[in-house]
Image (cartoon, grey):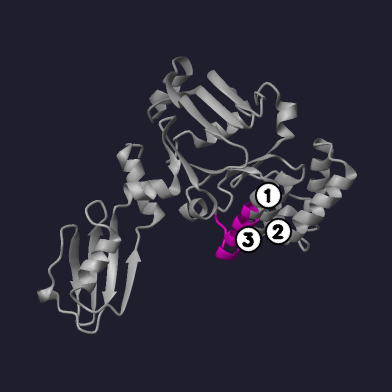
Amino acid sequence: MIFVKDLCKTFRVARRDGGMKNTLKSFFHRTYTEIPALDHLNFSIEDGEMVGYIGPNGAGKSSTVKVLSGILVPDSGTCTIDGRIPWKERTAHVKEIGVVFGQRSQLWWDVPVIDTFLLLKDIFSIPDDVYKHNVDELTDMLDLSQLLRTPTRQLSLGQRMRCEIAASLLHDPKILFLDEPTIGLDAVSKIAVRDFIKRRNRERGTTVILTTHDMQDIEALTERILLIGHGKILKDGSLSSLKEEFVTERHMTVLSSNFKADSLSLPQGITLMEAHSDRAVFSLDTTVLSVSDAISAISSQTEIRDLSVDTPSLDTLISKLYCRYEVL
């Protein structure tokens, strides 16, 4: 279990105006600004959960991951992961976690991927039989057979990311931190990575903390979302509950053989947006009228041949969350 309470981390950043005069002045008198990356951060994650950790740039996502992985020491607060304090018990801690940064590589650039795997085997003291089993399994699940003997620098971005994920799982970690794991990947590679992560969680019970701006990753992999802004958790809830709370508008497209817009009597909460001889588009406010009641009201006045209800995208939902909590 991951337990975080009142974590604080402040960075001291040098500031100066442009120009040669200000450059020379900064040699003798430097001005600093303190930026609170984490401000009394609180949350907990159960074993086996897959959580989307989202927020705008500068919200504190990467700082949180660095604290949880033991790379960064907070100024104050408590963080325990399966009873360990990450930055105090790093040797024991890193054997239980895997970390993938989409914009950074743990693979050696000029050597074949399999050589990096062998190096990681020694670093994590992975027994020979466990290493062979994991390499064979990961090679099969991530389709790495043609990549293992290729230098990292010759791999495409999608191929490299599959190898990065495999490298982070060689030692059977219980927790996997994924920071933008599908950044820049094509559609086929994204689907392959998502399917693998879901399978790993289902078969091994691996806890996954996913940090990303790709809302398709969030929707495909997670059920729970943690929204961070200004270094604090602003919203913690399931994806379905957030949709119910923030996505209150639906667009209904109705196909009818005898549609007559002028003769329709619409209840409160539904508005006619487009009208054609065989099709109409309605805007529905679900806080006033349910989808089923709207369908009943329309079907009582015209024959419905087909009907579709469109829900605003998850990007729209997240945008509303950002605006609600003023984190942009």
Residue 71 image-quadrant placement: top right
The answer to whether marks 2 and 3 mark residues whose Cβ atoms lie closer than 8 Å is yes
Q: Which mark is residue 142?
A: 2
Where's residue 92, x and y in %? Answer: 74, 28
Would residue 143 be found to the left or right of residue 45 on screen?
right
The answer to whether marks 2 and 1 mark residues whose Cβ atoms lie closer than 8 Å is yes
Residue type for callout 1: Ile
- Magenta-drawn stretch, dominant element (helix, strand or loop): helix
Residue type for callout 3: Ala
**Secondary structure at numbered mark 3:** helix
Give the residues in magenta: 184-198
Q: Is residue 183 visible?
A: yes
For the residues labelled 2 and 1, the Cα–Cα distance comes to 9 Å
- Which residue position is annotated with label 3? 192
Q: Quadrant of the N terminus?
A: top right
Residue 237, placed above or below residue 297: above
- Which residue position is annotated with label 1? 165
Residue at left offset 69%, top offset 39%: 174
Residue at left offset 39%, top offset 53%: 315
Would residue 44 be found to the left or right of residue 109 on screen?
left
| Residue 185 lies in the magenta stretch | yes
